[in-house]
Amino acid sequence: MISNSAEETFEFARHFAERLERPAVILLSGDLGAGKTVFAKGIAAAMGIDPREVTSPTFTLVNTHRVGGRTLHHVDLYRLNSVSSSDLGLEEMFDEPGAVTIVEWAERLADAPSGSIRVKIDYLSDSQRGIDIERWSALST
């Protein structure tokens, strides 16, 4: 999908989230300023969470939003090099019934759960972003 504005990215994410089966883990990757947090705001809006409350949790690593029985965990791994989900205690969030967990800078997560949805946002120009979505499966070793 090609997005021509932050508003299009937001709306695309909102429609995408309306069809999510929960619990869901969304692995966001892309360069700084590509639109990962805008995508997260669109997901929040679909869940009935005020998107203005969704900011990048760079310093706290995780922000949790709860509204009307719906839970959104927003994780930002920007300041970390590589980390396992057990180091941060993310497994409980990943498995929480009905919850959506968004992980920004997901390429820094060493062990994302199988069944996660990978969303890669590529910077194409000042106004355009390429958005690629695929289901991620862990490979057993």
Image: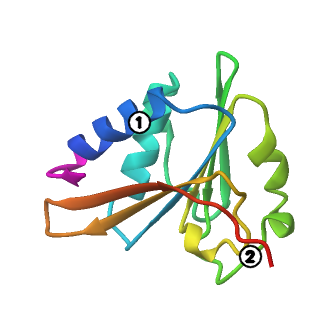
Callout 2 amino acid: Val
Seen at 57% across and 64% down, the residue is 58
Q: In the rendered view, tell whether residue 18 sits above or below residue 122.
A: above
Circle 1 is placed at which residue position? 16
Q: In the rendered view, tell whether residue 137 sits above or below residue 43.
A: below
The circle on residue 134 is none
Give the quarter of the image for residue 110: bottom right
Left or right of residue 40: residue 73: right
> Can I make out residue 78 in this image?
no
The crowding category of the residue bearing disc 2, from other C-alpha atoms within 10 Å (few below 14, some 14 to 19, many at least 20), is some
Q: Of tags 2 and 1, which is closer to the observer? A: 1
Give the quarter of the image for residue 114: bottom right
Callout 1 amino acid: Phe
Circle 2 is placed at which residue position? 83
Give the quarter of the image for residue 123: bottom left
Query: Which residues, given as a range, are shown in magenta?
Result: 1-6
Seen at 77% across and 31% down, the residue is 97
Left or right of residue 116: residue 19: left
Mark 2 / mark 1, whichever is N-terminal: 1
State the SS at label 2.
Answer: loop
Q: Position of residue 7 (x, y in %)?
A: 22, 41
Q: Position of residue 118 (x, y in %)?
A: 51, 58
> Can I make out residue 59 in this image?
yes
Nearer to me, 75 or 24: 24
Q: Position of residue 100 (x, y in %)?
A: 63, 39
Quadrant where the image shows the C terminus: bottom right
Seen at 69% across and 36% down, the residue is 23
